[in-house]
Image: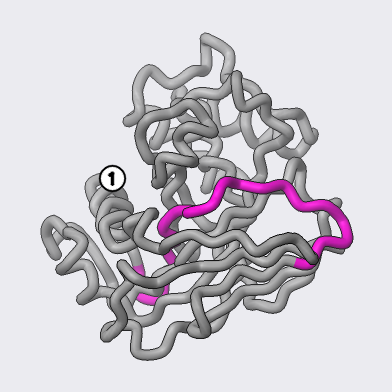
Amino acid sequence: MNNSLRIANHLVKEHRNKINFKILPTDLLPLNMDEAYLAQQSFHEQSGRGELGGHKIALASKVQQELCGIDHPIAGGIFKNEIFNSPHNIEIQNYHGLGLEFELAMEISSDLDESIGKLNENNVKNYISNIYTAFELIIDRNADYSKINALTMTADNVWCGGVVLGNKINDWENLDFNSLQSTLLWNDEEPQKAFIKDATPFRTLAWVINVRLSQNINIPIGSKIITGSVIKTRAPKKGDHIIYKIDSLSQVEVKIV
């Protein structure tokens, strides 16, 4: 059994036994990020959660990097049967350490492989069919955020537990995303606001696609790629009602039950 498969099997067992997140033991810790990504691919295959329906970036923004003590972004996979439409009820007992992140989701308009060449924040727009507001469902397994590292997080699929999609943003091609503001409404609390540009969503999308294609992972048409949270991850509790919206263009809504 190769090391990537050993790592994946160890992580799958931890998930199934609801063991809190911890750094991989020395004999399993990947030697570098390339090995960590190979372990992540094995995790996708061994998890029993089905095929991928998209990809994610973790730690895209400075606020998220500071939260986790890691100074670079990481890519992960989104399982197809864990992509939900808003409004959505989240049964919190089904998640081991649930957190929410507040993002944009991009839908890919054609099959992508490395023949398309290197993408950037401008030409990547040629490969987008739709854009949505989205919640990412984070499974941090009650992690101690002072005791995590990039290699373990990468192998553990950077904690992705699914995505909830809001309605699509109409005529997105003609919008100035640098001026768009998002609002988080959490129960009756004071609304929290952030600018979409802070997560550099199109640059982030290009980064995720470039990383995946460099790993010989093709991205099929219809895949959803989420582009990072502009607001710090937050843990919900039962009874919470949460809405994340971008002006009057799109909103995503969940209730925690």
Which residue is tagged 1?
A: 215
Which is more toward the observer, 57 or 217?
Answer: 57
Does 153 appear above or below 29? Answer: below
Examine the image and state in which quarter residue 147 appears: top right
Q: Answer whether residue 24 is visible to the viewer in this image.
A: yes
Q: Residue at x 29, y 63 (%)?
A: 202
Check the picture and name the quadrant holding the C terminus: bottom right
Q: Is residue 60 left or right of residue 102?
A: left
Examine the image and state in which quarter residue 197 appears: bottom left
Question: Where does the image place residue 64, in percent across and percent down from the top left?
Answer: 49, 40
Q: Residue at x 45, y 35 (%)?
A: 65
Q: Which residues are magenta?
A: 220-241
Q: Main secondary structure of the magenta part?
A: loop
Does 50 appear above or below 15? Answer: below
Which is more toward the observer, 204 or 3?
Answer: 204
Q: Residue at x 47, y 41 (%)?
A: 63
Residue that sits furthest to the front in the current view: 190
Which is more toward the observer, 103 or 206?
Answer: 103
Question: Where does the image place residue 173, in percent across and percent down from the top left?
Answer: 28, 83
Q: Answer whether residue 50 is visible to the viewer in this image.
A: no
Q: Is residue 226 left or right of residue 24?
A: left
Q: Is residue 116 left or right of residue 42?
A: left
Examine the image and state in which quarter residue 81 appears: bottom right
The answer to if 229 sits in the magenta stretch is yes
The answer to if 136 sits in the magenta stretch is no
Q: Residue at x 47, y 32 (%)?
A: 66
Question: Where does the image place residue 122, in percent across and percent down from the top left?
Answer: 17, 67
